[in-house]
Image (spheres, rainbow, N blue to C red):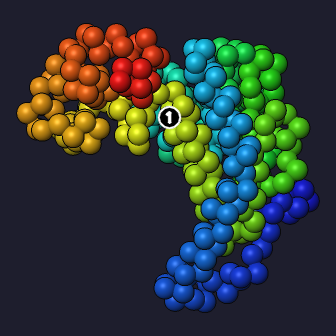
Amino acid sequence: MNPSLGKLLTEQQNPRTTGIDDMTAEQILRAIHEEDRTVPAAVERCIPEIAKVVEAITESFRTGGRLLYAGAGTSGRLGILDASECPPTYGSDPEQVIGLIAGGSRAIQQAVEGAEDNPELGRRDIREHQVSGRDVVVGIAASGRTPYVLGAMQEAVERGAVVVGISNNPDSEMGKVASIMIEAVTGPEAIVGSTRMKAGTAQKLILNMLTTASMIRSGKVYRNLMVDMQATNEKLALRARRLIQLATEADDDKVEQAYLASGGHVKTAIVMILLQVDADAAAELLQSSGGFVRQVLDHSY
């Protein structure tokens, strides 16, 4: 038995759930829910560090850099999920936010034997993506010591990237490598060592914060509307029209005209309607403002 494993908070036995195998279904669910309720407070304590990471990501995006997540198991899958949601939600380049997982694409659905134990695989993935000083690399590991993640982080440091760690244990090995460390200490799980539960939930909340806030700071949101979304199906096309209407309070006909003339680009259609300009002029104004709708409107009124 590895003695260091037992020292991790996420591997401790939770005294509140030692009788969970003798509970009814409803009692089990209530016990799990009580544990889950502690997660937002753990994340809240990390907001100052999360804000620093957002500023680093925003600066990286401004200079043409990328955000790369590196994780194994649940942590790797959460990074891939967050990365994959950015293009449809914010119209971002698919290469701007990238999720790396120990074991590669096969590991998204099933465990790959030994992949997370090899730091060289993490280093290799960072090299293959040609990480540079313009990039931000975020290592994710509940334990704070996963070799694959540590290898990726160490390689990224050597290449000059801003390196961040997300862990659910205090004083982790990742903290010795990261320039910014986020430690969302969620404590023992309802089921010993099942870090897909509280630890994974905390990681999901943090990743949501990182990309959402960074996209807002990059001009991808006007008010609280995702104005760079991609209307790739019927539901999203309807949402796009609704966003235009919410931003402009224009009638259906005017919204439809602007939507079609803009090629389905919400941000452009909003500027067209509010400033009464054509699509080319709206696109030019947006380009000159770095894509910030609010800046275009503030400078035009």
Q: Please state the horizontal and vertical placement of residue 240, each as a whole percent of the image.
A: 25, 36
102 over 41 or under it: above or below: above
Image quarter of the N terminus: bottom right
Amino acid type for the residue under numbered disc 1: Ile
View extreme (left): residue? 253
Give the quadrant of residue 181. Answer: top right
Q: Which residue is mark 1?
A: 216
Where residue 50 sits: x, y (%)? 68, 43
- How many numbered callouts? 1
**Mark 1 closeness class: few <14, some 14–19, many ≥20 residues within 10 Å:** some
Residue at the image position 41 percent from the left and 43 percent from the top: 224
Q: From this viewpoint, which residue is outermost toward the right?
A: 3
Look at the picture and state if 253 lies above or below 126: below
Foreground: 246 or 193? 246
Q: Position of residue 209 (x, y in %)?
A: 57, 45
Q: Residue at x 76, y 81 (%)?
A: 15
The residue under the point 64% across, 73% down is: 35
Q: Quadrant of residue 298?
A: top left
Check the image and report above or below for 108 versus 62.
Answer: below
Q: Indicate the quadrant containing the C terminus: top left, top right, bottom left or bottom right.
A: top left
- The image shows residue 253 at horizontal and vertical percentages of 8, 33
Tag 1, which secondary structure? Answer: helix
Instruction: Answer left or right for 106 relative to 286.
Output: right
Asked whether the viewer can see residue 105, the reply is: no
User: Which residue lies at the image location 70% right of the left edge and 60% below the top edge?
Assistant: 42
Quadrant assignment, res 163:
top right
